[in-house]
Image (cartoon, grey):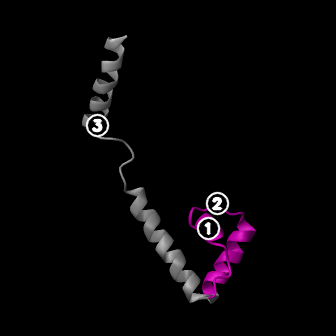
Amino acid sequence: MIQTLPYSTLLQYVYNELPVERQREVEEALQHDPDLAASCADLLLAQRALDGVRRNPRPETSEAILRYSRTFLSKS
C-alpha cells in the first residue's frame, strides 16, 4: 500500500474540512492510489454508520440518573 497522505488528512477530507487546494490534492492522490481510495471508502462507510447512531440517551436512562442524583440532595 502506498499511503501518500497522512490518515488525519484523509479524515479531514471525508469530513470536508480541507482547504480547496488541499482537497484537490487528495482527490488526485485518490485517483492514482487504489489502496488510498479503499481507505477513503472505509472512512466514508464508517462516517455514514456513525451518523445514524443515537446521540441522546433514552428517556428512561435520563430519569434514572436524575432519580439517583436526587438521593444526594435529600441526605444533606
Sequence-wise, the earlier of marks 2 and 3 is 2
Residue 32 x/y as whole percent: 63, 89
Residue at 33 percent across and 13 percent down: it is: 75
Query: Is 3 drawn above or below residue 13 in the view shown?
Result: below
Q: Is 32 left, or right, of 59 in this rendering?
A: right
Q: Residues within 10 Å of mark 1 (few under 14, many from 20)?
A: many
Q: Quadrant of the C terminus?
A: top left
- The main secondary structure of the magenta stretch is helix
Query: Is 74 drawn above or below residue 32 in the view shown?
Result: above
Q: Quadrant of residue 57?
A: top left
Secondary element at image label 1? helix
Q: Which residues are magenta?
A: 2-31
Q: Report how far apart the C-alphas of labels 3 and 1 lie in the structure.
A: 36 Å
Q: Which residue is mark 2?
A: 17
Q: Which residue is mark 1?
A: 13
Q: Please report contact status of discs 1 and 2: CB closer than 8 Å, yes or no.
A: yes
Q: Is 76 left, or right, of 10 in this rendering?
A: left
Residue at 56 percent across and 88 percent down: it is: 34
Q: Which residue is mark 3?
A: 61
Q: Residues within 10 Å of mark 3 (few under 14, many from 20)?
A: few
How many numbered markers are drawn? 3
Q: Quadrant of the N terminus?
A: bottom right
Q: Quadrant of residue 6?
A: bottom right
Amino acid on which disc 1 is placed:
Tyr
Residue 28 x/y as whole percent: 67, 82
Query: Is 39 drawn above or below residue 22 in the view shown?
Result: below
Q: Is residue 6 magenta?
A: yes
Question: Of 14 and 56, which appears nearest the observer?
Answer: 56
